[in-house]
Image (cartoon, rainbow, N blue to C red):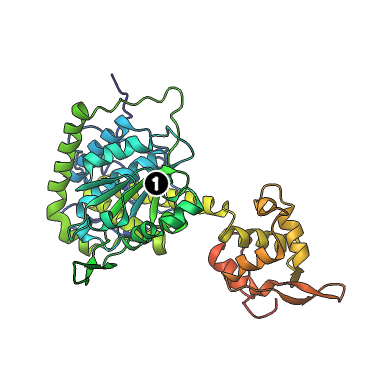
Amino acid sequence: MNHDTASGPEPAGSSPIPPASSWPPVAKPGAPGTHLPAQPTTASPVPGPPHIPGPAAAAEPAGAPEIPDAPAAEGDELLARLRALIARFVVLPSDQALDAVTLWVAASHLQPSWQHAPRLAVVGPAKRCGKSRLLDVLAETVHSPVLTVNSTPAAVFRSITEDPPTLLVDEADTIFGSPKMAEKNEEMRGLLNAGHQRDRYVLRVVGNDHTPHRFHTFAMAAIAGIGDLPDTIMDRSIVIRMRRRAEGERVSPYRTKRDSPALRTMRASLARWAKPLADQALHLEPQMPVEDRAADTWEPLVIVADLAGGSWPRLARQACASLVASEAESEDDQPSGARILADIRRIFFSASDPDSIATDQLLFALNGDPEAPWAEWGRGGLTPRGLAGMLREFGISSGNVRMGDHTQRKGYMRNKFADAWRRYCPTVHPLGPSTRQGSPR
């Protein structure tokens, strides 16, 4: 079967390089910190299958600094071949998602260098979206794969050693697919959460004398299933939202005996390339396009991209910014967490930001929004008790408030939301600097 391949990137140095002030210098493969943006590069790409840039490679976001390409080297060509292999068997939802999966696979070969072990959440709305096929490809290319289906937490953490394997968890919906399942598998969720950061151990007693023993949890993990994973796992993950192939989207059928040798050869090549870079990877601190836990999760992928050089430093940061922003939008659509804060912010703004709103007025607006989930929150929609319980998580409580007609009713003061709005939904009708929690407008 023939497979069409998009054209590769322009050779490094073929476009003007911006001044050093526009972006920190990108590490030169094998010599971090020595790549000078002002110095044009004439290196030609190493021969091999061309790298296929996504749409983001052609158009930078408005106002974003241009990231200069680093000189092409072995890592650039190796990642390009890995990317082409993955694309041969699986249709990813976007070019940025394909870049992210490629970098995640390569990062698994440098796990001893990382402080955080990013999860790869491979989720989809239904069957036949390519989730298990992607795990088949990962199982042949990641470092020391441990494939688990319905395994017990004890078996999983006993499989994790000081040299971390890469966990591949399929059919996660059978573990976390309903509240009852999730409650039954709380120990597995705790294990996957703890393993995101180094030096988080599971303490168990072993042997007839019940001696306490520490078990490692730190390991990268790809988790595939129908529907979203628990919030705490999604928050530690690079999220790949799979979808069914459309008409005209073609992939090669995967046959283990025929196709696994090429994938395992790629695994061996990645291991050889990564081994001498372990110390450099440990000490690099790249500038990230995101913050907080998202930065912790994506940092190994960005470091791998900087070590590989070529167009990968740029593509990695574009994929990071794009996928994190996409998940932030998805979070706004969830019927909990920041969604309730964002909807209440819109209600206050539509009412010209009064000092307070009565509880029954707030609930009338929330339950009356046809595109919001609150009318289906319970038999009669969101209730005063339900609202109070959700807002209590953010330190917000109701009280007696004075209304515009000089009556007193149960309601919420606007200034009590100010701090939470700034923290959890800062882009929804941003507040002015004069509003502080606990002080009137």
Q: Position of residue 290 (x, y in %)?
A: 41, 59
Amino acid type at image mark 1: Ala
**Residue 244 left/right relative to 23:** right
User: Viewer-proximal residue, 198 or 21?
Assistant: 198
User: Viewer-proximal residue, 217 or 326?
Assistant: 217
Residue hosting label 1: 172
Q: Position of residue 295 (x, y in %)?
A: 37, 60
Work out whether residue 33 can be spotted. Answer: no
Q: Position of residue 387 (x, y in %)?
A: 66, 64
**Residue 282 left/right relative to 420:** left
| Residue at 53 percent of width and 51 percent of height | 329
Residue extending farthest to the front is 208
User: Viewer-proximal residue, 415 or 67?
Assistant: 415
| Residue at 18 percent of width and 66 percent of height | 207
Work out whether residue 243 can be spotted. Answer: yes
Neighbour tally class for label 1: few under 14, some 14-19, many 20 plus, Cα within 10 Å: many
